[in-house]
Amino acid sequence: MASEERIIDIGHLCKSFGEKKVLDDINLYVRKGEFLTLLGPSGCGKTTLLRMIAGFMRPDSGSILLEGKDILDTPPHLRPLNTVFQRYALFPHLDVYDNIAFGLKLKKVPEEEIDKRVRKVLKLVAMSDYEDRDVETLSGGQQQRIAIARAIVNRPKVLLLDEPLAALDLKMRKDMQIELKEMHQKLGITFIYVTHDQEEALTLSDTIVVMNEGKIQQIGTPTDIYNEPVNSFVADFIGESNILNGTMIEDKRVSFIGHDFDCVDKGFGENVPVDVVIRPEDIYIKKNTEGEQFTGTVRSCTFKGVHYEMFVDTDSGNELMIQDYNAFEPGTTVGMHIRPGDIQVMKKERTQNSYRASVVADGRVSFLGAEWECSTDGFSAGDEVIARIAFGKVDLLDHEDEAVTTGNVDFILYKGNHYHLTIKTESGEKIWVDTNDVWDKNDFVGIRIAPKDIQIVKADDGNE
Amino acid sequence: MMKGGRIFAKIYLWVLMAVLYAPIVFIAVFSFTEAKSLGNWTGFSLRLYQNLFTGSMQNSAGLLSAVKNTVLIALAAATAATILGTLAAIGISKLKPRNRAVMSFLNNIPMINPDIITGVSLFLLFVFLHISQGYTTVILAHITFCTPYVVLNVMPKLSQLNPNIYEAALDLGATPMQALRKVLVPALRPGMISGFILSFTMSLDDFAVTFFTRGTIGLDTLSTFIYTDARKGGLTPELKPLMTIIFLIILVVLLLINIRNSKNDNKR
């Protein structure tokens, strides 16, 4: 369906609102005719990127090429693109027909042709009998159809859709997804679609671009993204997953949850810490324990319509989520195995916290916008150093007293037997923490580190 | 006891209505008699109406030109204020929330500012700027105190509007000017109309500001004419039918607007 020809080429796009980087060096191309989805949590920059392509916002730097021509200086009304807005943005003073004909009338298209095209597009969105209706008397789903019709009647080179289904109820949303997909196939127009709904992205797209905090995390087909997430953010955001700490023993051999497994990944090196992702439907669960790779006890079992969702405590004290067509009663001892091809190994983005720091005085260093006590043997005041702290050595407190600095829980990842938290500190930096305590997103935390757990090394030693 | 209370409430209401409407009814009734001094009933007559429309009365030219001035000034000021106020409201709505609150506050001050202060300060400003006073200054002054009312009427319409509607117009190929004309203005029209009507009536019955900004060229609006006329020794009797006619016009306009609004509400 999608050709190799590029219709949009985005290079090194950056945008900041004050201190906050909304888009950080975005590089992306869109092939002619494809259905590309920008997917990410709210505030990841996906809507900003779409608005820049439409021309409602200018980047600080970078380029956007449409069919090889730079369009940054082209105002929105001259770009051959059309947008379907969130909450429709229909013109309340015009009826359905005039809303759809708006763009064509501006382009001075002859009356009969407008009439023909409006009727054709109304038929396409299954709204033929509604042309004289006042748009405010239509339901949400109907307004959405008119908004799509109003955009595609102009035959844009690219159709931009900004969370077009977010305001609809679940049933309606599912129906519209199918219709959108069919419409895309029928029209052959390139679609760029923005959503925070991973299921919608997987259903609709030829290509998914996963974004977080202004950066592209991964670009790939829905199967790529689902089966081979490149980092724990993507793995966690797309679908359900078990994300676990592991060690790559050698090529095609990985160890996690206390057992060694064959896998298909290689090139990580030997005895390297990695993240391992196992999808819940990829763990085979059996009643007999003999001949299985590992065993465990079922803790809970919930019917989910098509399958059962079970939480199993493994023999090594990890918790795994498993989906299976068969139900296993809580308390049952079960055996499990995982096929090599279903184990997704990912390079760890970091293995410890590491900050540029400076020695303030004997026994005191400054980093993360605060001063910390630690051993500074071999350094003197004014030295630039690197401070390293293991994930598990950071204490989180629920109050400010005794804390050196404070922050908020930004991201939570469950790793089978502990939580891996990302904390945004007061200074706007991040610290990663392994803990067994349960915290909620956005919780306020006090941060404390024991002096012996802060390791100081020479600045030029650490290249992190 | 309960019954007595209800009777009291009814009496109270009627007394209140009487106090509010007695002066208007009084003028309307006495516009249909010939007596020069108010309160003397000398039998039913349409003489005063006849005088008003044929111009056979003392200082008829002065009264007619005052009416003409009043209407022209009100039309000019209300039109200019509607345009300025609508644009200002669109601008304010695009500000960041903090600045928007500040601007809305600044917009409210001229409305609660006593007319006399607005009048005197405008008078001083025009003198300071060496602008000769007359038509221009009166219209400028009226635009000044009318604009905030238009802003106040258009702002709620803007906040009800889908924030993307302007961008949707651009997206479909409208230039910024076309987007304003074909999408924003029609969507804001109800607010602009009520702003215009309010401005028109504010301008129509203004006395203090006009008095201080009309200069010495003998420009009179209805309010300043009546003021001078009354000081010259009694009101011209023909003012009674004129007041009655103005009151009726306003009443009809008000009824029309109400009927229109209730029709619109039913449609929703």
Image (spheres, grey):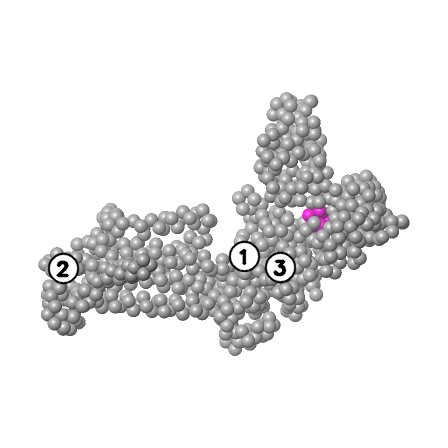
Q: Is residue B138 above or below residue A372?
A: below
Q: Is residue A302 left or right of residue A263?
A: left
**Which residue is labeled 1 in the image?**
A55
Q: Around disc 1, counting alpha carbons within 10 Å, would you say few (fewer than 14), some (14 to 19), or many (20 or more)?
A: many
Q: Nearer the viewer, residue A458 or A327?
A: A327
Q: Is residue B52 left or right of residue A332?
A: left
Of all chains, the one bearing label 1 is A
Residue bounds of the magenta highlight: A229-235
Tell me the crowding category of disc 2: few under 14, some 14 to 19, or many 20 or more residues within 10 angstroms, Cα based.
Answer: some
Q: Position of residue A452 (x, y in %)?
A: 70, 27
Q: Amino acid at mark 1?
A: Gly
- Label 3 sits on residue: A193
CA gap between label 1 and label 2 equals 63 Å
What's the distance in space between the residues labelled 3 and 2, CA to CA?
72 Å
Disc 3 residue type (three-letter): Tyr
The label nearer to you, 3 versus 1, is: 3
Amino acid on which the number 2 mark rests in the picture: Asp
Chain letter of disc 2? B
> Distance between the Cα atoms at labels 3 and 1?
16 Å
Q: Residue placed at 23% from the left, 59% from the top?
A: B19
Question: Residue B89 is drawn in which quadrant?
Answer: bottom left
On the question of residue A131 being in view, the answer is: yes
SS class of the residue under badge 1?
loop
Same-subunit check for callouts 3 and 2 = no
Judged from this view, the residue extending furthest toward the right is A291
Q: Which dot, 3 or 2, sits closer to the camera?
A: 2
SS of the residue under disc 2: helix
